[in-house]
Amino acid sequence: MAKKFYITTPIYYVNARPHIGHAYTTIACDTIARRQRMMGFETWFLTGTDEHGQKIQRAAEAAGKPPQQLTDEVSAEFRALWDRMGITYDDYIRTTSDRHKRGMQELWRRIRDNGYIYKGSYTGQYCVFDELYVDSAGPGEPCPVCGRPTETVKEDNYFFKLSAFAEPLIQLYTSQPDFIRPETRRNEVIAFVRSGLRDQSISRSTFSWGIPVPDDPKHVIYVWLDALANYVTALGYGSSDASKYEKFWPADVHMIGKEIVRFHCVYWPAFLMAARLPLPKSIVAHGWLLFEESKMSKSRGNIVRTETILEVLGADALRYFLLREVVFGQDGSFSFDALVQRYNSDLANGLGNLASRTLAMITRYFKGEVPYPSHAAAHTPEEDMVAALARHTIAEFHELFEQYQFSRALELAWALVAAVDKYIVENEPWSLAERSDENSRARLATVLYTSAEALRIVTALAHPVMPDATAKIWVQLGLGDIKKFSLTDLRWGQLHLGTKLGKVEPVFPRADKSAIERMQQMEEQQKTPPGATEAQSASAAQAGAAQGAAQGASQGPAPLNKPAEAANADGKITIDDFSKVELRVAQVKVAEKVKGADKLLRLEVDLGYEVRQIVAGIAEAYAPETLVGRKVVIVANLAPRKLRGLESNGMIVAASLGDGRPVLAGFLEDVPVGVRLK
Ligand code: MSP
């Protein structure tokens, strides 16, 4: 019977467009899936999108679109990106699909019929950003996970008897130490469960964007139960054809980011235990990709788009960089400089150079045919050392990969690249080629055979990480389609004599400084919507200085960006013009002075569905500490601008007094964050 392997990514929320943080998880899974296939496993790799819940409903409202339209658009964007990157997913699940809804409802019925669901009422705090019930917070208190303000929820809900599973969960974690990886996450989960589990609300009744609860459609299923169920519904659980489910469930690996460990390691196994279904074999959590020192996320406005890197350096470069540079499980920083540096040192000068010099010399000195390595006089201990190192690399690489230590595995393989480079330099095949005696010729053959064989081994090992470039090198080595190669067979000395090389071409052209500039420019351009004029940019920059609300309607300086034809002859605007300005209530979470700028404050304001950074010229009128917790009005749909190197994503509305002093707009009544002013 074929060995089977089932791996999943988290399903991505469709309130944000894909960035390299999402790509990181997907790349890790794709690499593992490719390797498992090369190891002979029948592999199923699932990804998809998480499309229900209050967060998505609010994002759709903010975008002025029906939620189904927003989810269709963003889900398609994720999928198109994975296709463009050559991600080898076998299935793409969407939680708004019928197959998922059907399977989810079946899972609900099963848990209910087993006696683990009851009706109750919930009064407590809820974090919409994390879609998390926060039992520990009081009204107005922040979410302990993301720091955003929680909202008070008072609803009749269905509850899941999570409290019944504390013991079985502890039993699971202790009897299967590899269930949660890495160890640090496992310890956190154990501590959390030991601290006591309360029953969990698993439905919502104050909004409708979700899957109706079976037999009680006034309720929709809690989005995390809905989302987690994708791992079985995608296999056909609850449908008439459950053959995939029978074949691939339980999953071998649920790969996730560290922020969603609790949902996967506590709630998901408890739901499955309640349904009496088999549990996944392991849950592996990686760290965050940081950019400019904080977690890359849409709400912080510090994302890097994958497309930019694909266009300039290609998917293989990004894949290699992320897996080599970031210690898996820990947080790691992304920068364009580091990316290009790693690309040049390890790929252009490393593997790329080894491939082109070795293959070019075989082409030149042996008419493009792998030469015969001497076992006699022309053989030295140096060849034995390269062979021994290669054997060690094959064995260790495998071990490290099994432990998800991608970075160390690649480091090891590249140590072999460096050793072969040194071997070539020391043995000077180009000088040997100039001599016509038999011994030099035999030595030349041995040196080039040894180099080519080491190249073959690194290429095979690196294939799951860099599928395109390694497939090309494989063809250049004359070995055909690398997909047909079985990694379990990889041994030293398999390169056949006389193998005819393919056409030798460079696979990693060197990148110069302009590559960094190009990528930076492409990201900057993305932030400024096309068609924005200089004047618009200037006015947006002033926006940070709290000039007044909609500029066309304010008492402030004449609007720089108002196209003449947008206003009526009497200077008045229409309601349609006004409705283009998205004014919203936001709460200040962080306020601090901007170094070297007397007038500017850097604010982080919460909109309920996201937190933004705004740079505002109000430092002379407001001390930062007086602003934290205050509700303000912002223009939410202003093009982002950079002020003093900081991105300002919106503008705070204020009255501008005669001396130019700003006075922030506010409300007498308490108003929830995120609501729109119309
Ligand atoms: N929809 C939930 C997951 C439900 S799974 C049943 C969700 N979605 S998400 O889009 O917010 O994040 C999904 C995953 O994207 C994270 O778990 C993580 O793997 C990845 N990342 C998003 N931003 C990231 C970084 N900045 N860095 C690394 N990974 C990141 O949570």
Image (cartoon, rainbow, N blue to C red):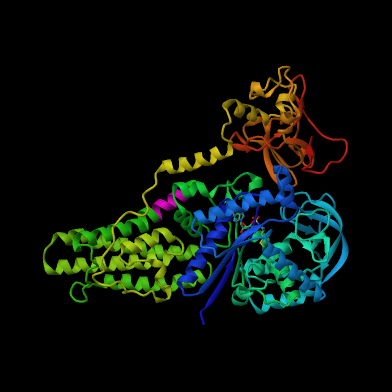
Q: Quadrant of residue 471?
A: bottom left
16 to the left or right of 153:
left
Q: Can residue 32 be seen in this view?
A: yes
Q: How many labels does the image show?
A: 0
Image point 30% across, 57% down: which residue? Answer: 356
Q: Can residue 400 be seen in this view?
A: no
- The picture places residue 172, in percent across and down from the top left corner, at 69, 77
Image point 42% across, 59% down: which residue? Answer: 468
Is residue 345 highlighted in magenta? yes
457 to the left or right of 63:
left
Of residues 593 and 641, the one drawn nearer to the viewer in this rendering: 641
123 to the left or right of 264:
right
- The picture places residue 273, in percent across and down from the top left corner, at 73, 75
Of residues 469 and 425, the one drawn nearer to the viewer in this rendering: 469
Residue at the front extreme of this rendering: 240
647 in relation to 426, above or below: above
Q: Give the magenta range.
A: 339-346
**Magenta stretch, overall SS:** helix
For ligand 1, give the image quadrant: bottom right
Q: In which quarter of the image is residue 329?
A: bottom right
Residue at the bottom extreme of this rendering: 1
